[in-house]
Image (spheres, rainbow, N blue to C red):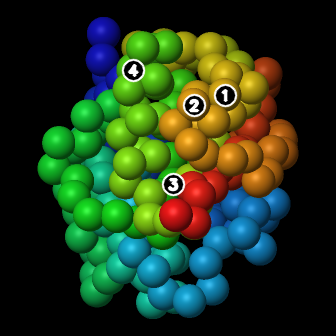
């Protein structure tokens, strides 16, 4: 089983679901931690590109990485799409002041999470931030997900030189029974 299993088949339903929640709703707890000036952004698991579009509309240059092209909705100036995936991100180059991984990390097993954290930490510019949301709850049929905690993720980040600057939790934006989310922001050193 692969982390993208079940997403192609449910693309139409997922597009509707993803577009029901706004960027501001999803990231309300960390909006103050996002760069105010335009920067290079890497969005991992970009889905429809909802977040990429919000960021691009504010002048950021976004590389949107999504292996399931059937989910792609938002196109436009400031967004460059790549078909790639964690942990390797073979097609991603450069350094980024902001990296986001929303509802992605739970698709990676423990070994993949270790490799992915090293790779992502290496893509962060000095002082850059990594914003992750971690899903907890029942796994939908036909999908691959692993238990993941904020504690483990922060430790992995620390092992790659990243410092935790925020940890929060919230209910599921779609009201799904038993589903909850944690949000974590990790920061690269300035030098």
Alpha-carbon span between mark 4 and mark 2: 15 Å
The disc placed on residue 130 is none
What residue is disc 2 on?
159
Secondary structure type for disc 2 = helix
What residue is disc 4 on?
112
Secondary structure type for disc 1 = helix
Which of 19 and 60 lies nearest the eye of the viewer? Answer: 60
What residue is disc 3 on?
100
Crowd tier of the residue under label 4, counting other residues whose Cα lies within 10 Å: few below 14, some 14–19, many 20 or above: some
User: Which of the two marks, 1 or 3, is nearer to us in this view?
Assistant: 1
What residue is disc 1 on?
155
Q: Is residue 174 above or below residue 25?
A: above
Q: Earlier in the sequence, mark 4 or mark 2?
A: 4
Q: Earlier in the sequence, mark 1 or mark 4?
A: 4
Residue at horizontal 51%, vertical 54%?
A: 100
Residue at horizontal 26%, vertical 63%?
A: 94
- Asked if disc 2 and disc 1 are in contact, CB closer than 8 Å, the reply is yes
- Residue 150 placed where, x, y %? 72, 30
Residue at horizontal 69%, vertical 57%?
A: 26
- Asked if disc 1 and disc 3 are in contact, CB closer than 8 Å, the reply is no
């Amino acid at each position: 089983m692969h982390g993208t299993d079940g997403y192609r088949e449910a693309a139409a339903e997922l597009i509707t679901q993803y577009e029901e929640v706004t960027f501001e709703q999803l990231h309300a707890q960390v909006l103050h931690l996002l760069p105010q000036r335009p920067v290079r952004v890497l969005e991992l698991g970009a889905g429809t590109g909802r977040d990429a579009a919000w960021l691009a509309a504010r002048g950021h240059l976004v590389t949107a990485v999504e292996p399931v092209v059937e989910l792609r909705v938002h196109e436009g100036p400031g967004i460059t799409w790549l078909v790639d995936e964690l942990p390797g991100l073979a097609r991603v180059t450069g350094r980024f002041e902001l990296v986001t991984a929303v509802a992605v990390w739970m698709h990676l097993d423990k070994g993949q999470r270790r490799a992915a954290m090293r790779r992502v930490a290496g893509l962060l510019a000095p002082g850059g931030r990594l914003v992750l949301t971690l899903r907890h709850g029942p796994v939908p049929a036909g999908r691959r997900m692993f238990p993941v905690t904020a504690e483990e993720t922060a430790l992995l980040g620390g092992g790659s030189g990243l410092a935790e600057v925020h940890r929060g939790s919230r209910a599921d934006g779609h009201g799904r029974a038993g589903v909850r989310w944690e949000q974590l922001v990790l920061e690269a050193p300035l030098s």
